[in-house]
Amino acid sequence: MQSSISNPLRLGLRQERVIPPQCLVIFGASGDLTHRKLIPALFELFLQRRLPSEFAIVGCARRPWSDEEFKEKMRLKLCDKISSHEQEWTKFTEFLFYEPVDLQEESHVKRLSQRLIEIDRLKATHGNKTFYLSVSPNFYEGGCKSLKNVGLLDDPIKSRIVIEKPFGRDYSSARKLNKIVQSCANESQIYRIDHYLGKETVQNILVLRFANTIFEPIWNRNYISNIQITSSETVGVEDRAGYYETSGALRDMLQNHLTQMLAVIAMEPPGKFDPEAIRNEKAKVLQASKLANEIEPWNCCIRGQYEEGGNYDNPLKGYRDENGVGKNSTTETYIATKIFIDNWRWQGVPFYLRTGKRLPKRLGEIVLTFKDVPVHLFESTIINPAPNQLIIRIQPDEGATFKFEVKSPGSGMRSRPVEMEFSYDESFGEPSDEGYVRLLADSMLGDPTLFTRSDEVEAAWKLYTPLIELMENAPWKLPVHKYESMTWGPPESDQLLAKDNIFWRRP
Ligand code: BG6
């Protein structure tokens, strides 16, 4: 973990809000997310001196650990990250507590509420509580009900719940879950997390669009020919087959992370920088979005599954050979689709979204391709002048590139494309924080701007309903094409764009 404290430039440029006294309760504390993301993010906040001294983290899971065992488990899991911060880690562990809790058992939650009273007194956390549900979605309903029944959600100002994705499996289950959660807490207490919204570069889209005058006038159907949104990973399913087999790329990435990026790129300017104003615009644009062909959805979506690949030194298994995956699994590890947005700004502009595992590069990017010039006055070094492109790099190497034509040196009048670069790292001399750092801080600050509201989640599920229904009722119409590991998905996904005379950008 890179400590920001050591970087004076970072402290100079940063403007951070102070997190109030707080008790953060993590359900699912023995799970992967806790030691991979949550505790590292909290430790990063500690290193940045953003955690108040009146603070406590209470890990909860079914395992019968003691406080000390929990601390030790976390230390072992994070040892690489804390090796250069041993002293700080020791101080940080003073915040850590553990309580064995089965969320399904109300008596356990009652016992927890007693323990929280003691911890509140000990750490002076002023009764402020954030409950983080990092558990299987099957426990969301029971968990919220138990918290409500023992009175832990009674104070709408001092208590909130953070809920991990996936929020529902489809439109109707998301609606049902929303109703249940909203019967336990006010919407203002509910923080549905999508860690992509915590990424600096996703937030930067708002600043790029609404803090500059040059982009907004051309950010529409008059100037933009198409938009591509890509999130690719080199990793396979790893040890998450149990979850992934029930999810697949549509539910795991497309419905949430990619669709949130779509919303931020395509939303109208909000009237003010206010959580509800922003979320209203995001919800509106998602409600106006639809698959390019809702009647024949198989014509606007390609699914794929990785096969073996790699090389002699690093052979990679095919998805069906991964631990815990069925030999005949038809779960998609790749999905690409085409979307239109039915509004004045975007009518007729295709948005192509793709995501997959075991692709050649780990990458998140949004590419806005502008329309061709009406008349080609000059010769080009390539067959036609390349259209202008704005490439927003979400990760890694966060930044943006603008591609435009310039005159090639010499006596002729030939044009060639060049690039203008912005890199976060070069401009600010620091890597951005992990999304979880920002989102954990925001949830404890009570700032819901970067969390998805119930109507947004529902609209995002509704958008993909024709595909989900097809996958469930007539899967043969949406076959899962094979692709070799470490290639850019099945060749069929190129056809999806080729029909429109467009190509995926090969980063
Ligand atoms: C998670 C998905 O939400 O996002 C994972 O469940 C995926 O399957 C991960 O690997 C990708 O996140 P990031 O931040 O590494 O792009």
Image (tube, rainbow, N blue to C red):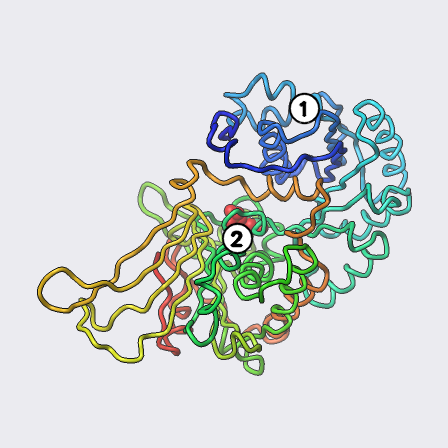
Q: Residue at the location (61% across, 58% down)? A: 247
Residue 322 seen in the figure:
no
Closer to the camera, 357 or 377?
377
Relative to 109, say whether 276 is above or below: below
Type of the residue with mark 2: Val
- Badge 1: few (under 14), some or many (20 or more) residues near its Cα, within 10 Å? many
Q: Residue furthest front?
A: 213
Q: Which numbered marker is on residue 71? A: 1
The residue tagged with tag 2: helix, strand or loop?
Answer: helix
Q: Position of residue 307 (x, y in %)?
A: 42, 57
Relative to 104, say whether 365 is above or below: below
Q: Residue at the location (16% across, 62% down)? A: 408
The residue tagged with tag 1: helix, strand or loop?
Answer: helix
Q: Residue at the location (63% across, 55% down)? A: 273
Residue 482 is left or right of residue 293, and the answer is left
Q: Which numbered marker is on residue 202? A: 2
- Badge 2: few (under 14), some or many (20 or more) residues near its Cα, within 10 Å? many
Q: Please say if the residues under marks 1 and 2 sit with CB atoms less than 8 Å apart.
A: no
Q: Distance between the residues labelled 1 and 2?
A: 33 Å
Q: Position of residue 370 (x, y in %)?
A: 38, 70
Residue 310 is left or right of residue 430, and the answer is left
Residue 121 is left or right of residue 346, and the answer is right
Q: Position of residue 225 (x, y in %)?
A: 41, 73
Type of the residue with mark 1: Lys
Depth check, mark 1 against mark 2: the one in front is 2
Q: Residue at the location (59% across, 53% down)? A: 244
Q: Position of residue 404 (x, y in %)?
A: 30, 63
- Answer with mark 1 or mark 2, whichever residue precedes in sequence: 1
